[in-house]
Image: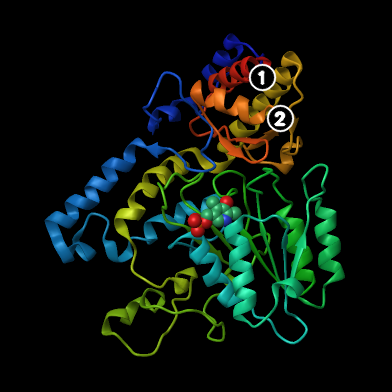
């Protein structure tokens, strides 16, 4: 059933939404609380109310225990990262042993490539999506140069169609097949940060594996947004950031997935640190590294407890809701946003182009729109009216209605403002 583009229709959809009450669990920006329409959970997720409580509990335990908090704190700091594994595993479709929360995303991409990008003989090339997020491009280029390889020759970028700005999976598969003897690694952003396109990860992973390459995914815009089955899809590794859909707070901790087939192997090159060493004798300080036989082997340092605490609050909510219910609402909310944008386009007489695929199977909750010529002015007026969205030159607005805390009314109100500010 389609939801009418009216305040009443939106409010009825909210009343029927089983996840509606979760909105109350989050803090919206206070600058003008009445007006704020927050659509940038894909950039920085909101603060869960419980984040402050959990952070205060850790600060209190630090005050109470000092160093003894490593064992005596309510959540002992020694094993702090273990608090995240069950929820993260469910979010990305993995076994608990295959995930660990640590570091920042770009750091983790490098650590993963140290292990899984191992150019040898003719197999030297990396295949990625064209116009990847800059940090990913820098990471890929510098990994190639680190191995003495020229990115111009060894990085295969599958460029978007200039008209649609999307990358058809067929082009990616064709390129994998064409380079099958030279590919060492396929690494792509699961959901593109700019277009919102969600790639057919299973199909691409399968093609990469059949070509004999390692396959890794950057899930910055996918983790907590779309349903994932990393273990089942036979993905080698993945990494994501915690501060977008997962609401870990600015610069908050990232997560990685390493498929269990790579666990416990002595011959995998890895940058090693004491937190990756076998837990039984870590504190006897042995001088030879023996990896933990899980993804935790890739940890270097002990966990930054204060920086990780807020993520616990958000993951508790993810555990309650589950990705299935979240996706169900996400599909409705995103379809509603699309409909509301299409109405605004028609009624204002302005041509709004929706860049993001209209097929729900090819996107998460983000919709990117382009308003040639009018975009910047409209974006400025929308911002003044309280819409927090994301602007990309030359004329793109990215919007993410996040099912955990955005409402149908948010989307309806946005549509009205868009129509109004495109007209004048
Ligand atoms: C947000 C984002 C990043 C950010 O990297 P950090 O190391 O967390 O600063 C990297 N890659 C992609 C694709 C992103 O969307």
Query: From where the camera sits, is residue 288 visible?
Result: yes
Residue highlighted by disc 2: 371
Q: Residue furthest bottom?
A: 287
Q: Residue 240's quadrant in the figure? A: bottom right
Q: Residue 276's quadrant in the figure? A: bottom left
> In the rendered image of this protein, does residue 308 appear above or below residue 325?
below
- Identify which residue is drawn at 14% across, 55% down: 63
- Helix, strand or loop for disc 2: loop
Mark 1 or mark 2, earlier in chain: 2
In the rendered image, the quadrant that contains the N terminus is: top right
Q: Between residues 60 and 413, which one lies in front from this camera angle?
A: 413
Q: Locate ligand 1 by image quadrant.
A: bottom right
Do the numbered discs 1 and 2 sit on residues whose CB atoms are within 8 Å? yes
The local crowd at label 1, few if under 14, some if 14 to 19, many if 20 or more residues have their Cα within 10 Å, is many
- Helix, strand or loop for disc 1: helix
Q: Is residue 363 left or right of residue 290?
A: right
> In the rendered image of this protein, does residue 197 appear above or below residue 288?
above
- Identify which residue is drawn at 44% across, 58% down: 85
Q: Between residues 63 and 235, which one lies in front from this camera angle?
A: 63
Query: Could you tell me residue 421's position as x and y percent?
Result: 62, 18
Query: Could you tell me residue 95's position as x and y percent?
Result: 53, 61
> In the rendered image of this protein, does residue 399 appear above or below residue 288?
above
Residue highlighted by disc 1: 422
The local crowd at label 2, few if under 14, some if 14 to 19, many if 20 or more residues have their Cα within 10 Å, is many
Q: Residue 143's quadrant in the figure? A: bottom right
């Amino acid at each position: 059933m389609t939801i009418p583009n009216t305040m009443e229709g939106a409010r009825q959809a909210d009343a029927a939404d089983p996840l509606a009450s979760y909105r109350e669990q989050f803090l919206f920006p206070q600058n003008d609380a009445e007006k704020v329409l927050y659509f940038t959970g894909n950039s920085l997720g909101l603060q869960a109310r419980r984040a402050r409580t959990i952070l205060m509990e850790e600060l209190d335990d630090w005050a109470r225990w000092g160093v003894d908090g490593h064992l005596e704190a309510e959540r002992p700091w020694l094993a702090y990262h273990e608090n995240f594994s069950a929820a993260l595993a469910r979010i990305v479709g993995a076994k608990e042993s295959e995930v660990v929360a640590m570091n920042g995303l770009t750091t983790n991409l490098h650590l993963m490539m140290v292990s899984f990008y191992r150019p040898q003989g003719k197999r030297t090339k990396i295949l990625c999506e064209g116009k990847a997020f800059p940090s990913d491009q820098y990471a890929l280029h510098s990994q190639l140069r680190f191995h003495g390889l020229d990115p111009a020759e060894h990085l295969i970028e599958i460029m978007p169609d200039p008209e649609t700005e999307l990358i058809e999976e067929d082009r990616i598969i064709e390129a994998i097949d064409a380079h099958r003897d030279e590919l060492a690694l396929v690494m792509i952003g699961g959901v593109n940060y700019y277009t919102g396109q969600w790639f057919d990860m299973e199909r691409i992973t399968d093609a990469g594996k059949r070509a004999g390459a390692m396959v890794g995914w950057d899930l910055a815009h996918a983790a907590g947004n779309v349903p994932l089955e990393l273990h089942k899809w036979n993905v080698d590794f993945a990494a994501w950031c915690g501060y977008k859909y997962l609401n870990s707070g600015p610069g908050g901790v990232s997560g990685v997935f390493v498929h269990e087939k790579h666990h416990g192997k002595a011959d995998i090159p890895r940058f090693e640190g004491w937190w990756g060493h076998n837990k039984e004798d870590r504190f006897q300080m042995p001088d030879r590294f023996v990896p933990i036989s899980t993804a935790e082997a890739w940890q270097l340092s002990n966990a930054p407890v204060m920086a990780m605490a807020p993520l616990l609050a958000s993951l508790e909510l993810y555990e309650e809701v589950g990705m299935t219910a979240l996706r169900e609402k996400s599909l409705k909310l995103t379809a509603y946003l699309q409909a509301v944008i299409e109405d605004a386009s028609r009624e204002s007489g302005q041509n709004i182009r929706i860049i993001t695929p209209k097929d729900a199977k090819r996107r998460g909750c983000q919709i990117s729109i382009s308003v040639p010529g009018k975009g910047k002015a409209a974006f400025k007026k929308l911002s003044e009216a309280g819409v927090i969205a994301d602007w990309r030159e030359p004329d793109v607005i990215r919007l993410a209605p996040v099912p955990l805390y955005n409402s149908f009314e948010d989307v309806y109100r946005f549509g009205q403002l868009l129509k109004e500010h495109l007209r004048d």
